[in-house]
Amino acid sequence: MSIAVTTDIVETARVRHDLWPVATAALGRAMTGAILLAGDFKNHENVSLRIKGDGPLGVVHVDAFSDNTVRGYVDEPHVDVPLKHAGKLDVGAAVGHNGEVQVTRFTQLAQDYTSTSPIQSGEVAEDLAYYLYTSEQVPSTISLGVLVDPDYHTVVAGGFIVQALPDATDEALAMVETNINELGPVTEYLKAYPDGKGLVEKVLDGLTVNEVYNEPISFKCRCSRDRFAGVLMTLREDDKKALLEDETTELVCHYCNEKYHFSREELEDMFAPKGLIQ
Ligand SMILES: [Zn+2]
């Protein structure tokens, strides 16, 4: 079992992308899910998760890296859909009920592994559990939750995944299922215990628990000015010329919404043919 408390990560994403509540909930669940899919980070595996539904959010993009960092965005951050019963955000309607979940696992050493499964509800947790079962043959229980305030800020966010080892007994599985049902929504638990303390013991109540690792995770992008400069260098000559017509060129990173500015003088210098000085 793994748990992830992602309140700070989700709030960072919300501020960076100016997410509206249902977008915060969808991206927050997806980022938490990707972190859980990446597992213990000990095998240095990165996970890219794309949820391509037919809802107004467009595609939900998340990358969880083996250095305990995660980044993500949605195509349309300013989405509003009617609330569900009891004032709940309708993530399923925002993501869409049709489409696919695509997961890519990649390391520096092994070849990328990409697999997809159809979206079940668009509520993310159920879609990821279905993905794990059908594409990776791993029966899992996943719970993900993001609680957003009326003023839009993230109150709590987090989730957990339980995967039974092949030798798990039926009694143990039934016990865990009962515990999860008694627990209720994970956001309720995190409201009472914001650091997730005691959650593992509660879900695995009646079983022996060993803590194997406990590491902080953060929202962090891999973009940099140098990287964008490198991209500019690969443009066609016509496109380079077009950029030079502007006083400054602004590039925006999709993943973290960081803005990079290049002045005309800088670009002229970058694009100038570099040869030996005669
Ligand atoms: Zn970035």
Image (cartoon, rainbow, N blue to C red):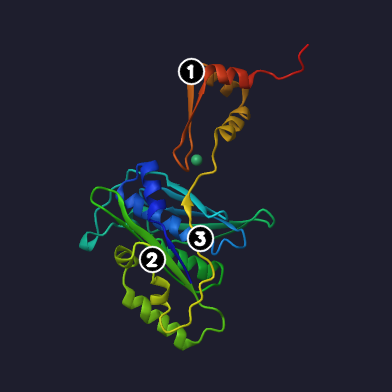
* Mark 2: secondary structure: loop
- Is residue 250 depicted above or below 18 in this figure? above
Contact? badges 3 and 2 (CB < 8 Å): no
> Which of the numbered marks, if any, corresponds to residue 246?
1
Query: Closer to the N terminus: mark 3 or mark 2?
Result: 2
x and y, in percent, of residue 70 in the image = 49, 51
The amino acid pointed to by label 2 is Gly
Residue at position x 35%, y 48% from top? 56
Residue 242 or residue 212, whichever sits in front: 212
> Seen in the image, is 204 located left or right of residue 68?
left
Is residue 95 visible to us here? yes
Residue at position x 55%, y 16% from top? 265
The amino acid pointed to by label 1 is Asp
> Seen in the image, is 89 located left or right of residue 160?
left
Residue at the disc numbered 3: 215
Contact? badges 1 and 2 (CB < 8 Å): no
x and y, in percent, of residue 43 in the image = 62, 62
Is residue 54 visible to us here? no
x and y, in percent, of residue 145 in the image = 36, 62
Residue at the disc numbered 2: 196
Q: Dot 2: within a 10 Å radius of its alpha carbon, few (fewer than 14), some, or many (20 or more) residues?
A: many
Residue at position x 54%, y 70% from top? 212
Tell me the CA gap for discs 1 and 2. 50 Å
